Image (cartoon, rainbow, N blue to C red):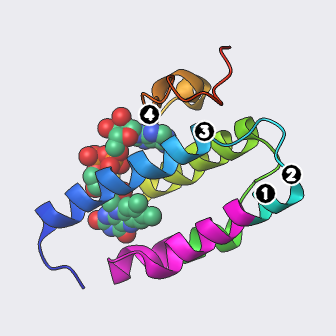
Amino acid sequence: KLGNETIKAELGRAAWRLFHTTFARFPDKPTAEESSALQSYIYLFQRLYPCGECANHFRQILDQFPPQVSSRSAAAAWGCHVHNEVNKSLKKPLFDCSNIGDFYDCGCAEDPNEKVE
Ligand code: FAD
């Protein structure tokens, strides 16, 4: 267990950024294999998350709200929802999930596979 609250918060911010940015970059129309990869990634993220208390807590949230991996927008909305579940339990303000589409940008627009939207 990480004892230091500052480290736990830093880790949380970094993890959430990676988590939401991954969903923001997930395909709009994923193949079955891509959806399956994202689902495994989410469950492994939970299992290996390096704060035991957080991981246990997140496990319960995943049991209640199974990962939505059918499309980019479904994954992004789901990620926003489960982050809000954590926010609720920590008594933090809730994020407006209707803004999630614009909020996470990895700066990858130079990627040749990127479609301009
Ligand atoms: P964070 O919650 O880290 O959010 C970072 C930024 O993301 C915010 O400033 C905001 O711009 C944006 N944001 C906020 N809400 C959303 C949303 N719903 N969707 C998209 N973007 C959003 N800490 C504990 O003390 N106990 C726990 O049990 C615990 N469990 C955690 C479980 C997981 C899986 C993760 C990743 C983190 C967990 N944390 C836990 C850490 C905690 O969630 C925060 O990361 C940490 O407290 C720092 O909070 P923060 O206020 O800086 O904002």
The answer to whether residue 90 is visible is: no
Q: Is residue 60 above or below residue 87?
A: below
Q: Secondary structure at mark 4?
A: loop
Q: Is label 2 or label 1 in front?
A: 2
- Name the residue at 32% across, 77% down: 51
Q: Amino acid at mark 3?
A: Arg
Q: Secondary structure at mark 2?
A: loop
Name the side, left or right, on which 1 lies relative to 108. Answer: left
Q: Which residue is mark 3?
A: 25
Q: Residues within 10 Å of mark 2 (few under 14, many from 20)?
A: few
Labelled pair 3, 4 in contact (Cβ < 8 Å): yes
- The residue lying toward the viewer, choosing from 34 and 58, is 34
Q: Residues within 10 Å of mark 3 (few under 14, many from 20)?
A: some
Q: Which residue is mark 1?
A: 35
Q: Which residue is mark 2?
A: 31
Q: Is residue 116 above or below residue 88?
A: above
The residues bearing labels 3 and 1 have C-alpha atoms spaced at a distance of 13 Å
Image quarter hosting the C terminus: top right
Q: Position of residue 103 (x, y in %)?
A: 47, 26
Q: Which residue is mark 4?
A: 106
Name the side, left or right, on which 73 lies relative to 111. Answer: right
